[in-house]
Image (cartoon, coloured by chain):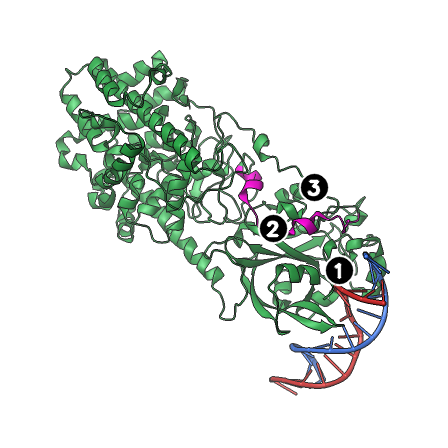
Chain colours: A green, B red, C blue
DNA sequence: GTACCATGCAAACGG
DNA sequence: CGTTTGCATGGTACG
């Protein structure tokens, strides 16, 4: 995971605490500047007022940028990051906010964006800034040089205050729901004035292409943030410009893209308007500013809608409402047209492509419609389903027919953690999908398309009163820099960590095809324990259980198991067990095989006999009996064990073994009756191993039994041979 | 009868 | 002599 995660409380933080803490958090923040506090609050997830339709495609753009670039590209490539201002990463102050990966991704977007923008040079600068981040004045403009080609305040410092006020109003107004959800999550898009010309240089052509607007006299507000700022400045000096003119100009400029219907759909409460206008200067000027803001938003949103629709039609294969939608890598993130940078939340963990769907309704907190795992047939007979009480029907085992589909696809995987599950899964950052604040009923504008209805809450009044805070643009930049720094550090740290974890040994020979560099090891890092009720589950009792006649080998709850493979993911019991244990199904782990450990497997020989069929099916084909060395990443510890996969000739056939397993077994405390599971990370191309301890609450009885006695006791269980039922499917060699 | 596999066990190896 | 390596044996499930 290279990003930010939102913990149970909905707090956004990177592994190392991205930015938010620095910024004083949101509600509970300690920001000293009113503006900071206000921003943070405004941007807090708890404020998640704005939940407009959001296209996952938008997410993908920056997402990809943020994730797949090892080295952060130069700023011009990521215009949207530019002034990802400040507050975006304000943590969700609302405890009740359920976290979903999607929103968490969104929440982390800004940080990621900053990270993307972050140059090493800036890091130092940021460090410096960080030390005195409470003093906005001391923020060296250079710290944001890469993103601040439009440092208007610097050009006109004298005007700064007024300009800033205006800008702040805009920003905060944007925070207050005139902008899209993504803007909420990443205010960078709000602070257009910070966006560089580079951005515009890149964006403008596309924008024009996507939305050709014959606007010779077009007020630049929709296209050019700089113009926007300047215009605001100018307008501050030209009060004669009245609302009608503003509106008229805007209409002229947007006649191509804004329909009367769009305008009619704009609904604002009077109180909102009045308050906002007041904060925007009051009187006519304030109204004018407010109008501009609204129009800007409408335009932006309209443009986005158009873009989104185009994008979806053209190449987006899925509807973002589809929880199983396949992530589109979108290798060429297209710049977001117009002012809205639409920072895409980075995927905190490339190995876990966060679903790029977002609830359409901001109020949709019940994830069940999309959380529900795909309907699976009864798990009985599923290979490796530890909870299958009945004997596995090997012959009809779907695994046999589905083994070809082990490559996990996000389209048919589901992640409970994506939704509003309070995450007990905190033992390992990577193991936790970023939890994002669940959509919250907006406090302010609940945007649906162009229609947003302002819902006035007491907090808004306070916010509005704070619009005129003394916060400066520098403060915002500083905050942004801090967050970028934190994220950048976090990002690098994790890269380093991943590299260490995955540093292959020279003799690592076998590796499933796939991407390198993603850390899937820790994603499922959990205590590999499975507890089996001793009563009424004889067939589920672990091997060696005192009263278990013969245990049905319980397959481990895999962190990410091919649903096709059954892997008990569809078993409520296992699912619950997984949740209790922190296991979360992930997308990119393909179940290969499992093996209930025999005494000989956990003995001092350091070798584990592997089920022949599965070994031959899912592990590299062995030409020589010496086999190959396979680095097996321990899911539990992220440690990589170089195990040798080999075979013995045996009765005109082969016996497949995994050698050098002694340390692994010992480190995991595995005993007879426990089991191991092998996975391959389809994305990272790694083999992963997981040792699962199966213990009943009571002390395990004498587990040492002769193989013969075990055999005798296993007669009741087709899977009694300790391997997957499919083992019984004979494959003559 | 055959395949699978748990494990016994002898040979090889090494301190 | 202890450990490791490699093969062989035999029980079990299944066709």
| Tags 3 and 2 both on a single chain | yes
Q: Is mark 2 on a helix, strand or loop?
A: loop
**Real-space CA distance between mark 1 and mark 2, rounded to the nearest whole angstrom:** 20 Å
Task: Give residue B12's position: percent from left, percent from top.
Answer: 67, 85
Q: Mark 3 points at which residue?
A: A573
The chain identifier of the residue carrying mark 1 reads: A
Q: Could you tell me residue A694's position as x and y percent? A: 70, 53
> Does residue A436 appear in the picture of this structure?
no
Q: Is residue A273 above or below residue A302?
A: above
Q: Are marks 3 and 1 on the same chain?
A: yes
Number of numbered discs overlaid on the protein picture: 3
The tag earlier along the polypeptide, 1 or 2, is 2
The answer to whether dots 1 and 2 both sit on one chain is yes
**Residue A9, how many percent across, how many down?**
50, 36
Judge from the rendering whether residue A4 lies leftward or rightward of residue A402; answer left or right: left
Residue A730's tag is: 1
Q: Where is residue A431 in the image (x, y as percent from the top left)?
A: 53, 48
Q: Mark 2 lies on which chain?
A: A
Left or right: where A470 falls relative to A406: left
* Dot 1: element: loop
Relative to A308, is A121 on the left or the right?
left
Residue that lies at the very extreme toward the top in this rendered image: A270
Q: Which image quarter is the C terminus of chain A in? A: bottom right
């Amino acid at each position: 995971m290279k990003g930010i995660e939102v913990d149970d409380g909905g707090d956004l933080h990177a592994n190392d605490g991205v930015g938010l803490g620095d910024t004083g958090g949101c509600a509970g923040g300690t920001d000293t500047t009113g503006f900071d506090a206000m921003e943070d609050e405004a941007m807090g997830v708890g404020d998640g007022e704005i939940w407009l339709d959001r296209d996952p495609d938008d997410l993908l753009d920056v997402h990809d940028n943020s994730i797949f670039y090892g080295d952060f590209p130069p700023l011009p490539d990521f215009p949207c990051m530019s002034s990802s201002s400040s507050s975006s990463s304000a943590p969700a102050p609302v405890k009740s906010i359920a976290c979903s990966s999607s929103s968490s991704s969104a929440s982390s977007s800004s940080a990621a964006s900053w990270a993307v923008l972050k140059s090493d040079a800036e890091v130092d600068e940021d460090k410096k800034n960080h030390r005195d981040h409470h003093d906005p004045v001391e923020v060296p403009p250079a710290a944001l040089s890469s993103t601040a080609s439009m440092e208007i305040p610097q050009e006109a410092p004298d005007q700064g205050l007024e300009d800033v006020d205006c800008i702040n109003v805009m920003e905060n107004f944007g925070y207050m729901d005139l902008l899209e959800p993504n803007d909420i999550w990443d205010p960078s898009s709000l602070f257009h004035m910070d966006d560089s010309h580079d951005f515009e240089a890149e964006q403008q052509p596309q924008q024009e292409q996507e939305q050709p607007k014959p606007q010779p006299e077009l007020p630049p507000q929709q296209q050019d943030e700089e113009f926007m700022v300047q215009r605001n400045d100018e307008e501050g000096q030209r009060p004669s410009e009245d609302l009608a003119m503003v509106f008229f100009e805007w209409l002229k400029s947007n006649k191509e893209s804004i329909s009367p219907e769009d305008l009619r759909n704009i609904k604002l409460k009077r109180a909102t308007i009045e308050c906002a206008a007041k904060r925007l200067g009051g009187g006519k000027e304030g109204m004018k500013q407010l109008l501009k803001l609204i129009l800007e938003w409408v335009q932006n949103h309209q443009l986005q809608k158009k873009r989104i629709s185009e994008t979806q039609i053209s190449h987006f294969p899925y509807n973002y409402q589809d929880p199983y939608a396949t992530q589109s890598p979108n290798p060429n993130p297209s710049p977001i047209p117009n002012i809205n940078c639409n920072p895409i939340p980075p995927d905190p963990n490339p190995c876990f492509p966060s679903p790029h769907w977002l609830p359409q309704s901001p109020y949709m907190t019940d994830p069940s419609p999309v959380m529900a795992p795909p309907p699976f047939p009864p798990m009985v007979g599923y290979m490796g389903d530890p909870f299958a009480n009945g004997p596995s029907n090997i012959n009809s085992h779907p695994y046999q027919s589905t083994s070809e589909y082990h490559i996990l696809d996000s389209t048919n995987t589901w992640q409970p953690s994506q939704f509003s599950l309070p995450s007990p899964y905190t033992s390992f950052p990577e193991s936790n999908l970023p939890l994002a604040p669940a959509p919250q009923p907006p406090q302010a504008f609940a945007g649906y398309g162009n229609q947003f209805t302002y819902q006035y809450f007491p907090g808004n009044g306070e916010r509005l009163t704070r619009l005129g805070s003394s916060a400066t643009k520098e403060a915002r930049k500083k905050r942004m820099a801090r967050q970028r720094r934190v994220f950048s550090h976090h990002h690098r740290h994790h890269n380093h960590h991943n590299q260490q974890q995955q540093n292959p040994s020279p003799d690592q020979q076998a590796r499933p095809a796939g991407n390198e560099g993603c850390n899937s090891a820790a994603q499922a890092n959990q205590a590999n324990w499975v507890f089996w009720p001793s009563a009424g589950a004889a067939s589920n009792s672990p091997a060696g259980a005192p009263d278990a006649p013969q245990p049905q080998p319980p397959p481990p709850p895999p962190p990410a198991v091919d649903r096709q493979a059954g892997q008990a993911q569809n078993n409520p019991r296992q699912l619950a067990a997984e949740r209790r244990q922190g296991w979360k199904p992930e997308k990119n782990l393909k179940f290969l095989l499992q093996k209930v450990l025999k005494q000989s497997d956990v003995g001092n020989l350091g070798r584990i006999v592997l089920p022949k069929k599965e070994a031959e099916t899912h592990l590299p084909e062995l030409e020589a009996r010496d086999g190959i060395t396979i680095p097996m990443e321990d899911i539990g510890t992220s440690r990589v064990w170089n195990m040798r996969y080999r075979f013995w000739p045996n009765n005109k056939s082969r016996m497949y073994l995994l050698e050098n397993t002694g340390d692994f077994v010992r480190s995991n405390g595995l005993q007879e009756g426990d089991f191991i599971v092998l996975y391959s990370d389809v994305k990272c191309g790694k083999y992963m191993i997981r040792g699962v301890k199966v213990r009943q609450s009571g002390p395990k009885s004498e587990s040492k039994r002769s193989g013969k006695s075990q055999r005798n006791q296993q007669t009741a269980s087709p899977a009694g041979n300790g391997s997957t039922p499919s083992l019984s499917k004979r494959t003559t060699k």
